[in-house]
Amino acid sequence: MKFQIEDVTVYFPYDHIYPEQHSYMVELKRALDAKGHCLLEMPTGTGKTIALLSLITSYALSKPSNPIKLIYCTRTVHEMEKTLAELKLLHDYQVRHLGPSARLLAVGLSSRKNLCINPAVVSAENRDSVDAGCRKLTASWVRALAVENPNIPTCSFFDNYEKSGSEAILPPGVYTLQDLRAFGKQKGWCPYFLARHMVQFANVVVYSYQYLLDPKVAGIISKEMQRECVVVFDEAHNIDNVCIEALSVSVRRQTLEGATRNISRMSQEIERFKATDAGKLRAEYNRLVEGLAQRGNLPIGDTWLSNPALPEDILKEAVPGNIRRAEHFLSVLRRLVQYIKGRLLSENFEKESPVSFVASLNAQVGLDQKTLKFCYDRLHSLMMTLEITDTDEFLSIQTICDFATLVGTYARGFSIIIEPYDERMPHIPDPILQLSCHDASLAIRPVFERFQSVVITSGTLSPIDLYPRLLSFNPVVSRSFTMSLTRECICPMVLTRGSDQLPVSTKYDMRSDPGVARNYGRLLLEMAAVVPDGVVCFFVSYSYMDAIINTWNETGILKEIMQHKLVFIETQDVVETTLALDNYRKACDCGRGAVFFSVARCFLRTSLLCRGKVAEGIDFDRHYGRLVIMFGVPFQYTLSKILLARLEYLRDTFQIKEGDFLTFDALRQAAQCVGRVIRSKADYGMMIFADKRYNRHDKRSKLPGWILSHLRDAYLNLSTDMALHTAREFLRKMAQPYDKTGASGKRTLLSQEDVEKMSSAGADEAMF
């Protein structure tokens, strides 16, 4: 269908549109007109992606004199592929209506691991090994040697791409990762380097968050992007944690041992170069006297990770004299590694600011802030000079230099935390030094400043007013949309007690209560007997899930559940979990029914961004998820030293109370888990929040509006038997035929004619 939103003709590839999609487009256009940033919360399963793509591409078509580019950021490769598939459909529709003038170039960009077509390289087991395998075949010095000695292996795909020069371009169209690989095989060109080259010419680029938020990657991939870009962060409810991860570094004993080996290897290489090719070391020294600004002119095959500090924080000046000579720089690294080794011997928890850490480092081993600031770029320069290609072997020294550069660059928004052991296992020494970023706005500020419009959107952004404070920006539009439905197909319930009237909760003091475990078990057993097909259960952590399943097994509840449905469990192994999910779907398909036990959050000492594998990105639509039970409130591990330091920073800097942030964070994760169950308006499902704390208004009110609008008073403070009665009533109602268009009452599907009427009515109102 084709309709007007003010002066923009919107091309939408379906015959009908949801009212909330239309409202979403109107708000998005307001933000684009104002050249400002916006926050938009849209319920899951309401076509957010196609609404975004339709409006922004149509907006670009309507303003050919001032073209805008769309940078669409996703969290996973799977989401990237889904976005590009939607865009393909939309592009075909626009070309049918407008002809060749609507043609655009849209490219998905991912790592070498996902794009490489050289069998010798892509067979490596992980991403770092694939990157190193690629460099061994494409580095400029390797190819120079191969000209003289044909026995030295190179990559024929990269060589063909280089030989084609300016002819190596992608014709207009929408290219998924699979399309890029197929095109590369057909032409004999490297799809990874071709995609990287085409990013600057494409009208739409779809890639991972890290390509914009992590300075090490963004400095290489995204530095060419012009200001006239619209940046979309989809599923961005966790964007603050992604920003923090991008600027945080962890150092363990193993890291230091690896770094020591790396320094010895580089020292041997320097001696070899002195004997065979001292001119290269001399040339590097002269270049360093002038400064490090030359790195932008490297051949594309030689580019490596960029500086971990943000672009405006990098000094554009000559490298300090004490690290210009290669051997002097290695001496600095040895002293730094030795100092950190000494700090890891501490038997007590320590926390200090970067300023005091640098002062202590200077006093003990004579390394000042400026020397530290240049460590990462100096290491990059040295590895280029020494012609090192197996970069996967040098990850430890990269981590140390990454740490040094960030410590030397930032005085505020960071803490250095030293933990001698994991608090959950105090008898096992496992020292770790962490440079922990607390300020999410640091990583995303360059994005807000550089691009004219940034759109942050997700199904769970409530409470929406907290994000501008966390990310330190002023949105011109901030809006949360509800879901228009012809029937009440969502049934959220808050269960506070079992049939025996004992309260249920995963609060720490109630966790080990056998009554709670029994009541949770009875709830699942009763529901498994009534609810058809698939039931998904989320627990607050792996340890709690293990404990409760063990209890159910010992008391015979698990055996009773398995008489109704098969049981599958998520584990910490990706392959096992994938297999369990596959078999869970088969059990639902064949009518046997199944229960899937999953985890809302797992806890790592080094990360705040650790979710269960199934909690995000895996959909339980249709019969795969007729009920989802959230056992407990998925708070973060509140004794985590990183979390405590961040909470203190948020309180002092942004005046966000600890309790408010922890509740907001737990409820967005709970909403993300239960939201897996509804993926379209034709779908239906129930959500049970099984914890007495959800009955409190301060907790419940932080759930997204589209869930709260269905959470009636009759669904609050339920016991197991009341919840069972509600579930039976709901399922009976869902079994009735219903009017999909909503012609009898509230319209939930708008035709082109309906949209035109709305537009003309809006125009009339504006005139009067």
Image (cartoon, rainbow, N blue to C red):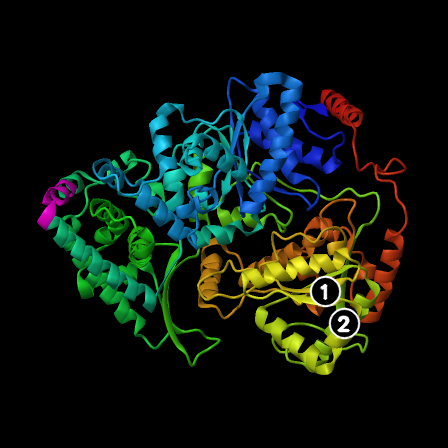
Kind of residue sitting beneath label 1: Val
The answer to whether residue 88 shows anywhere in this view is: yes
Q: Are marks 2 and 1 in contact (CB under 8 Å)?
A: yes
The quadrant holding residue 514 is bottom right
Kind of residue sitting beneath label 2: Ile
Mark 2 lies on residue: 561
* Residue 345 drawn at (x, y percent): 30, 74
Q: Quadrant of the C terminus?
A: top right
Residue 595, labelled with which disc? 1
* Residue 102 drawn at (x, y percent): 59, 21
The answer to whether residue 439 shows anywhere in this view is: no
Q: Nearer the viewer, residue 21 or 613?
A: 613
Q: Residue furthest front?
A: 151
Query: Is tag 2's residue or tag 1's residue first in the polypeptide sequence?
Result: 2
The quadrant holding residue 561 is bottom right
Query: Residue placed at 63% from the left, 35% from the top?
Result: 86
* Residue 135 drawn at (x, y percent): 33, 45
Up-down relation of residue 40 to residue 255 (above or below): above
Position of residue 396 in the picture relative to residue 321 (left or right): right
Q: Which residues are magenta?
A: 275-284
Asked whether residue 282 is drawn in magenta, I would say yes
Label 1: how many Cα within 10 Å (few below 14, some 14–19, many 20+): many
Q: CA distance from mark 2 to mark 1?
A: 9 Å
The quadrant holding residue 81 is top right
Secondary structure beneath dot 1 equals: strand
Up-down relation of residue 80 to residue 64 (above or below): below
